[in-house]
Image (cartoon, coloured by chain):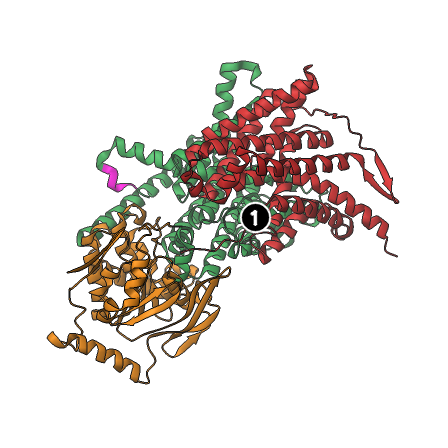
Chain colours: A red, B orange, C green
C-alpha cells in the first residue's frame, strides 16, 4: 500500500528546502536581468558573506555590528566588481562575461579563505531545527523560517522595484538598456547597485545556508544547486527563481526517495540537472523566461 | 535628376537608365522591359521565385499581410519600402528563417509551406544579410570558401587523411573561391581576417560568399546600406554582372528608393506589410501610393537600430 | 596571385620547420637532460593537460560551445581504458587507447545533443550534468573500478608490442608521442572544411545554416572530436602520469582548470593550449617557491592554494578583458617585436 502521508512529508520537506535554493537563485536573477550576466560567483559571494559574518562574531563582535560590518563589506565588493570586472568587459558576449565570473568566484573564494581561514565554523542564528507536527506531517521549523525569510525578501523586492528610484532604474535597464541610457540613467551606477543588492541577498542566503551546513568552503557550491533552478525557472524571472527552487527541491527529494533506490542512491547530485535539461529541450527559455525572437 | 526633398531626408529618383537587357536596345528599353514582364506572366513556366498570399505576425502585430510576389528568371527584382515595412521578414521567409502564418513559397516547380533552410544552398539559393553575417574569425578566402560548404560530401575522416574525393572537392572549391575573389576585386584582402576589414569591403566579401555557389536565385538584404557612394557603384556593378554572366535571378531589398531604380527590372513596394505597388521603376516612381508612403515616413529618422 | 601562393607555401614550410624543431628538442634533448622529477611531475602532466586543452579548444575555442564538463571525459577515457585492458587482455594497449577515446566520444555525442537547442551558458549549465553524472556513476557502480569500493583504479603498465614504458623518461616519451600524433591530426581536421565549419558555426550560426553547413553534424563532430581527445588525455593522465586515480580526481575543479588553460593560453589556438597548460603546471610550483622565499613558514599549503586561486581567477578576468586571445597573442607580439623581419613567418 502506497504511503501517501510519507509522500506528503517528502514533498513538503523538498519544497521547503527548495526555498533555500530560490534564495540563492534570486541573486542570480537580479544580476542577469539588469546586466545580462550569469553570475557564477554568486555562490562565492554567499560564502564570503557568511564567512565574514561568522568570523566577526567569533572575534567578539555583537550580532548586529557584525551584520552591519558584513553589509558594508558586501557593498564594497559590489562596487569593486562593477569597476574591475564588469566595466572592462562591457559589450562582450554573455559567455565571456560568464567565464569572467568563474574567475571572479575563484578570486572571492580564495580571498575569503585567505582572510578568515579554511576551518569549518558553526553558525547559530537562534532558530532551532526541531520539527513540529501538522496533521501527522513533520515540518522543520528552520525550513519554515527560511521560507518566511525568502518570502519577505521577495515582497521587499517587489516594493523596492515598484516604489524606489533605484528599483525603477533597475527595471528600466532590464527592459531596454539603450532606452535607459537615452533617458540619462548611468549604467555603471545601476550595475554597481544591483551587485550590491545581490551581495545582500548573498548575505541572507549565506546566513541561512551557513546555519544549516556550517560555514565552510562547500557553501560556495550551492551555486551548483541554483543553476538548475535558474534553467527551470528562466534566468530573468524572480517568480521563476521561486517556482524553480520549489520544483528542484521537490524533484530532488522525491527522486532520491522513490527513484534513488533503483540506482543505489546519491542521485541528488544530478537529478535536478536531468530535469532541467529535459525541460530545456522542450522550452529553451525555461518556464518563466522571456522568449527571444532571433533577428537577422 | 529629380529630387524629392522632405524634412529629414532626400530621395533621389535617379534618371540613369534602367538595366540594359540583352534583348532591348536604345529607345525601346522601357517597352522591352514591360514586354518581358508580360512575357514572363503569360508563359506557363513558373517564375524562378513565387510568393503566394504570405502573411506573418509577431505576437499579434502583422508584419506581412497577403503578400504576393513573382520573380522571373534572370530578373533583378527590387523590394523597397520604408523601415519596418516587412522587407527583411519577406527574405527571412524565403530563406526559411521565419515560418509564415499563411501562404507558400515557390522555387520554380517546388512549393514550400516552410522553406527548409538547410536545403537552401542545395536548391541553388544564396543570400546576404542586412547586418553583416561574415565569419569574423576566418580569412576572406575562407569565408568565400564557406559558401561551398554544402558541396563537401567527404566525411571528416576522409578530410583528415586527405582521401582522393576530399582532395578533389577541396581543390574544386578553392579554385571557385579564387575565381570569385578575383571577379570581385578582393585579391588584396584575400588573407585578411574578415572581421578586420572596413564595412564596405565586408559587404563585398558577403556578396562573394553568396556568389561563389553560382546561385540560381540570389537574395540581397540591403546590400548598399551604410557603404560609400563609390562602393555602392561597384557593388551594384557586381550585382548586374552576376546576372549577366551567370544568369542569376536576383531579389534585392532596399529602403532607399533611389539606389534600386537604375539597377532593377521590376520593383515591388511594401508599406506596413502590404504590397502597395508593383511594376517597372518608371511606373513605381510615379505611383501616388508610393509617393505617399515615402512622404509619410519622411519624419522618421534614417537610423536603424541593429540587433 | 602567384606571389601570394608562394608566400603561403613559404609560410607552411616555416611552420613545418618550427614544429620539427620542437619535436626534435622534445625527443632528443629533454629525455636525456631532464631529471626524473621534471619528467614525471612536470612534463608528463603538462603534456596530458595540453592534449585535454587541445580537445576543449576544438569544442569551445573553435566551435564556440562552452563546456564545463571536461573532467568527466578525462574520467571516461581513463576508466574505459582500464576496463578494456581488464576485460579484454588480448587487445594491445594502443587499441585500448583509441577505443577509450571512442567511448568518450560516444558519451560526448550524447551530452552534445542539447547543443542543438541550447546556446551559451544554457549549454554550459547542461554540460555540468555530464560532470556530475559521470562522477556519480563511477563512484556508485564499483563494476567500473573492478569492485574497488571507493572507485580507485591502478593503471596497468604501459607496454606496446612487448616494449614496456616504465621509467619516467619512457612514460614521458610515450605521452609525447600520443600527444604529437593527435595534435597533428587535430591540426589537419581544423584546416579541413570541417574545421572551417566549426568557426562558421561559432561566428554566425544563422549564416552557417543558410549556407548549408550541417549544424547537427558539425556540432556533434565538435563534441565527438573534443571528447575523443580529452578521453585519450584522461588515459595518459591515469596511465602515464598518476597511475592510481579515483573519480574524485576528475571533479569540477579539474574541468575549470582545463577551461582556464584555454582562456589563459588562447582560445582557438592549438599553440595556446600548450602554453596555457605549461603555465597552469608551472605556475603553482613557482608560486610556492616564491611564497616560501618571501614569507617563510607562513606560506603553507593552504595559503598557497588560496593565493593560487586568487591569482588564477584574477588572470582569467584580466585576460578576458585585456587580451582575449591569451598568452599566445602576447608571445606572438613579443616575438614580432624582437624579430620584425620574421613577422610574416609566424605560424598561426
The picture places residue B167, in percent across and down from the top left corner, at: 33, 62
**Is residue C311 in view?**
yes
**Residue C345 falls inside the magenta stretch:** yes
Total numbered labels placed on residues in the image: 1
Q: Secondary structure at mark 1?
A: helix
Protein chain holding label 1: C
Does residue B255 lie above or below C53 as drawn?
Answer: below
Among the 4 quarters of the image, the one containing residue A179 = top left
**Residue B198 falls inside the magenta stretch:** no
Does residue A292 lie above or below A156 as drawn?
Answer: below
Q: Residue at x 18, y 51 (%)?
A: C3
Among the 4 quarters of the image, the one containing residue C17 = top left
Q: Residue at x 48, y 43 (%)?
A: A95
The picture places residue B123, in percent across and down from the top left corner, at: 37, 71
Q: Quadrant of the N terminus of chain B?
A: bottom left
Q: Is residue A115 or residue C131 the one in the foreground?
A: A115
Range of the magenta residues? C342-346
Residue wearing tag 1: C127
Q: Residue at x 42, y 33 (%)?
A: A88
The picture places residue C115, in percent across and down from the top left corner, at: 52, 54
Q: Residue at x 79, y 46 (%)?
A: A10
Q: Is residue B52 or residue C120 the one in the foreground?
A: B52
User: Could you tell whether A183 is left or right of C297 in the image?
Assistant: left
By secondary structure, the bulk of the magenta-drawn segment is best described as: helix
Q: Is residue B261 or residue C294 the one in the foreground?
A: B261
Q: Residues within 10 Å of mark 1 (few under 14, many from 20)?
A: many
The picture places residue A101, in percent across and down from the top left corner, at: 51, 36
Does residue B214 lie above or below A272 as drawn?
Answer: below
Q: Is residue A241 or residue C157 the one in the foreground?
A: A241
Amino acid at each position: 500500500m502506497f504511503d501517501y502521508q510519507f509522500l506528503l512529508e517528502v514533498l513538503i520537506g523538498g519544497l521547503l528546502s527548495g526555498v533555500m535554493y530560490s534564495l540563492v537563485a534570486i541573486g542570480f536573477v537580479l544580476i542577469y536581468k539588469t546586466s545580462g550576466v550569469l553570475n557564477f560567483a554568486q555562490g562565492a559571494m554567499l560564502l564570503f558573506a557568511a564567512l565574514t559574518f561568522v568570523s566577526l562574531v567569533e572575534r567578539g563582535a555583537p550580532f548586529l555590528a557584525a551584520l552591519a560590518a558584513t553589509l558594508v563589506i558586501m557593498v564594497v565588493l559590489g562596487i569593486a566588481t562593477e569597476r574591475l570586472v564588469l566595466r572592462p568587459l562591457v559589450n562582450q558576449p554573455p559567455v565571456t562575461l560568464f567565464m569572467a565570473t568563474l574567475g571572479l568566484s575563484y578570486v572571492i573564494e580564495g580571498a575569503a579563505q585567505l582572510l578568515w581561514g579554511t576551518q569549518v565554523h558553526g553558525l547559530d542564528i537562534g532558530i532551532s531545527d526541531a520539527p513540529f507536527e501538522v496533521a501527522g506531517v513533520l515540518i522543520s521549523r528552520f525550513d519554515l523560517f527560511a521560507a518566511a525569510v525568502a518570502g519577505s525578501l521577495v515582497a521587499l523586492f517587489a516594493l523596492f522595484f515598484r516604489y524606489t528610484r533605484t528599483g525603477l532604474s533597475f527595471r528600466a535597464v532590464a527592459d531596454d538598456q539603450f532606452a535607459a541610457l537615452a533617458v540619462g540613467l548611468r549604467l555603471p551606477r545601476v550595475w554597481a547597485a544591483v551587485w550590491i543588492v545581490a551581495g545582500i541577498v548573498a548575505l541572507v542566503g549565506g546566513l541561512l545556508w551557513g546555519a544549516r551546513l556550517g560555514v565552510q568552503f562547500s557553501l560556495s557550491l550551492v551555486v551548483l544547486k541554483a543553476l538548475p533552478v535558474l534553467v527551470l525557472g528562466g534566468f530573468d524571472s524572480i517568480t521563476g527563481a521561486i517556482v524553480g527552487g520549489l520544483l528542484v527541491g521537490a524533484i530532488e527529494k522525491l527522486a532520491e526517495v522513490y527513484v534513488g533506490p533503483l540506482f543505489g542512491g546519491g542521485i541528488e547530485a544530478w537529478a535536478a540537472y536531468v530535469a532541467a535539461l529535459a525541460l530545456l529541450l522542450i522550452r529553451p527559455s525555461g518556464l518563466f523566461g522571456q522568449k527571444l525572437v532571433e533577428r537577422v | 535628376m529629380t529630387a524629392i526633398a522632405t524634412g529629414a531626408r532626400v530621395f533621389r529618383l535617379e534618371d540613369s537608365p534602367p538595366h540594359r537587357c540583352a534583348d532591348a536596345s536604345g529607345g525601346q528599353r522601357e517597352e522591352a522591359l514591360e514586354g518581358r514582364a508580360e512575357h514572363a506572366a503569360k508563359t506557363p513556366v513558373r517564375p524562378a521565385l513565387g510568393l503566394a498570399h504570405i502573411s506573418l505576425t509577431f505576437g499579434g502585430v502583422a508584419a506581412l499581410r497577403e503578400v504576393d510576389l513573382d520573380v522571373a528568371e534572370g530578373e533583378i527584382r527590387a523590394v523597397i519600402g520604408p523601415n519596418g515595412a516587412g522587407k527583411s521578414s519577406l527574405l527571412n521567409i524565403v530563406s526559411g528563417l521565419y515560418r509564415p502564418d499563411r501562404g507558400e513559397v515557390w522555387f520554380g516547380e517546388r512549393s514550400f509551406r516552410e522553406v527548409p533552410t538547410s536545403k537552401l544552398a542545395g536548391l541553388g539559393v544564396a543570400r546576404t544579410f542586412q547586418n553583416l553575417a561574415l565569419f569574423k574569425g576566418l580569412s576572406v578566402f575562407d569565408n568565400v570558401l564557406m559558401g561551398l560548404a554544402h558541396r563537401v560530401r567527404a566525411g571528416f575522416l576522409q578530410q583528415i587523411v586527405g582521401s582522393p574525393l576530399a582532395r578533389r572537392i577541396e581543390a574544386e572549391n578553392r579554385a571557385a573561391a579564387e575565381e570569385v575573389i578575383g571577379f570581385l576585386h578582393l585579391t588584396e584582402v584575400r588573407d585578411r581576417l574578415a572581421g578586420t576589414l572596413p564595412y564596405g569591403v565586408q559587404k563585398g566579401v558577403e556578396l562573394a560568399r553568396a556568389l561563389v555557389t553560382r546561385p540560381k536565385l540570389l537574395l540581397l538584404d540591403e546590400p548598399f546600406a551604410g557603404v560609400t557612394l563609390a562602393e555602392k557603384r561597384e557593388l551594384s556593378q557586381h550585382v548586374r554582372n552576376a546576372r549577366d554572366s551567370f544568369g542569376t535571378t536576383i531579389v534585392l531589398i532596399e529602403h532607399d528608393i533611389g539606389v534600386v531604380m537604375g539597377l532593377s527590372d521590376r520593383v515591388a513596394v511594401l508599406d506596413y506589410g502590404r504590397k502597395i505597388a508593383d511594376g517597372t521603376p518608371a511606373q513605381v516612381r510615379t505611383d501616388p501610393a508610393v509617393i505617399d508612403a515615402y512622404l509619410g515616413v519622411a519624419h522618421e529618422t534614417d537610423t536603424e537600430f541593429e540587433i | 596571385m602567384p606571389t601570394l601562393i608562394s608566400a603561403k607555401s613559404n609560410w607552411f614550410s616555416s611552420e613545418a620547420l618550427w614544429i620539427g624543431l620542437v619535436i626534435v628538442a622534445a625527443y632528443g634533448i629533454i629525455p636525456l637532460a631532464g631529471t626524473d622529477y621534471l619528467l614525471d611531475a612536470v612534463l608528463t602532466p603538462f603534456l596530458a593537460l595540453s592534449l585535454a586543452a587541445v580537445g576543449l579548444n576544438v569544442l569551445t575555442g573553435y566551435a564556440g560551445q562552452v563546456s564545463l564538463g571536461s573532467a568527466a571525459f578525462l574520467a571516461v577515457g581513463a576508466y574505459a581504458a582500464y576496463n578494456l585492458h581488464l576485460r579484454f587482455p588480448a587487445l594491445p594497449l594502443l587499441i585500448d587507447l583509441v577505443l577509450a577515446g571512442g567511448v568518450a566520444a560516444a558519451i560526448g555525442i550524447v551530452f552534445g545533443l542539447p547543443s542543438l537547442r541550447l546556446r551559451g551558458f544554457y549549454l554550459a549549465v547542461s554540460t555540468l550534468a555530464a560532470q556530475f553524472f559521470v562522477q556519480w556513476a563511477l563512484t556508485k557502480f564499483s563494476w567500473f573500478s573492478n569492485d574497488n569500493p571507493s572507485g580507485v583504479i591502478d593503471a596497468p603498465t604501459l607496454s606496446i608490442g612487448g616494449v614496456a614504458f616504465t621509467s619516467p623518461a619512457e612514460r614521458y616519451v610515450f605521452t609525447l608521442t600520443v600527444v604529437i600524433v593527435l595534435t597533428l591530426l587535430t591540426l589537419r581536421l581544423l584546416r579541413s572544411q570541417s574545421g572551417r565549419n566549426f568557426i562558421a558555426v561559432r561566428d554566425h550560426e544563422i549564416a552557417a545554416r543558410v549556407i548549408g553547413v550541417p549544424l547537427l553534424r558539425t556540432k556533434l563532430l565538435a563534441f565527438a572530436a573534443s571528447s575523443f581527445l580529452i578521453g585519450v588525455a584522461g588515459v595518459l593522465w591515469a596511465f602515464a602520469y598518476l597511475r592510481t586515480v579515483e573519480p574524485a580526481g576528475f571533479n569540477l575543479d579539474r574541468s575549470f582548470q582545463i577551461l582556464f588553460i584555454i582562456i589563459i593560453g588562447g582560445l582557438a589556438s592549438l599553440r595556446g593550449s600548450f602554453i596555457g597548460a605549461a603555465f597552469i603546471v608551472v605556475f603553482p610550483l613557482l608560486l610556492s617557491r616564491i611564497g616560501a622565499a618571501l614569507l617563510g613558514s607562513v606560506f603553507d599549503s593552504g595559503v598557497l592554494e588560496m593565493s593560487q586561486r586568487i591569482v588564477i581567477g584574477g588572470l582569467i578576468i584580466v585576460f578576458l578583458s585585456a587580451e582575449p586571445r591569451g598568452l599566445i597573442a602576447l608571445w606572438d607580439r613579443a616575438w614580432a617585436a624582437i624579430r620584425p623581419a620574421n613577422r610574416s613567418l609566424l605560424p598561426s
